[in-house]
Amino acid sequence: MTQITEVMNEQLFDTTIREDEYRDETSGLIYCKNCRTPRQLKVEFGGEIRYPRTLCHCMQERRERENLSRRAKEFRDRIARNRSVGLADPVLWECTFANDKGYNPKQMAMAKKFVEKWDTVSKGSTGLLLWGDVGTGKTFIAGCIANGLIDKAVPVLMTNFTRLLNRLTDMYSGERNAYIDSLNAYSLLIIDDLGIERNSEP
Ligand SMILES: [Zn+2]
């Protein structure tokens, strides 16, 4: 611990003038050649004048940029993780508003609104039921909603009734409760083909 403190102090009170620095004549402090702002402070500490190191303007800007890009990367990673967990079938990743061919304009407009108004929709626990025959594009529309919300960092699980039932059937009752509880981690649960697919077991 002492060693670490000493190293930090050494860096904090480093008086070596580096290549990109100069000593400002007026203040006597070390300045950055690039942005011409101080890299040293003058502070009184315990009755003693000390000159700790500080970040000049361009170093601060670089640090802020790095923080921003790190947070942006974390956000992208979280979204990618949510997508791969929530949309287990990669085919669904292609179901996006951008990939819409315009076969169901009315329903798509409603799906878009559902995503746009998610804050209100989620508060009211409003659901959306898409029904129609096989091949009418329900999965695509539901997938668009799922991806649209995942892009907004909303955790969504899109699964189908068969998969859900099969998982539950394979479990003991304790596990079943835990699994159902785990579904609460998602803000939206989309069950595709509700009532159409049936477990083939008798
Ligand atoms: Zn600088």
Image (cartoon, rainbow, N blue to C red):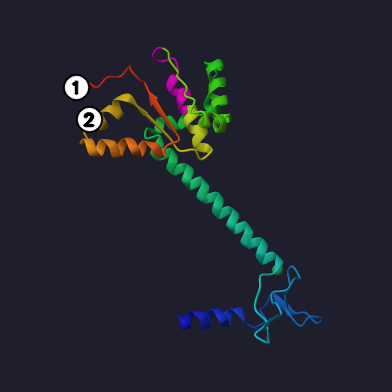
Farthest bottom residue?
48
Determine the image quadrant of residue 59: bottom right
Amino acid type, label 2? Thr
Q: Position of residue 67 (x, y in %)?
A: 58, 57
Q: Earlier in the sequence, mark 1 or mark 2?
A: 2
Residue 137 falls inside the magenta stretch? yes
Q: Which residue is mark 2?
A: 169
Q: How many marks?
A: 2
* Relative vertical location of residue 191 with respect to residue 9 in this rendering, above or below: above
Quadrant of the image where one finds ligand 1: bottom right
Q: Which residue is mark 1?
A: 201
Q: Answer yes or no: do the residues labelled 1 and 2 have beta carbons within 8 Å?
A: yes
Which image quadrant: the N terminus? bottom left
- The region drawn magenta spans 133-143
Secondary element under disc 1, as helix, strand or loop, is loop
Seen in the image, is 15 located left or right of residue 70? right
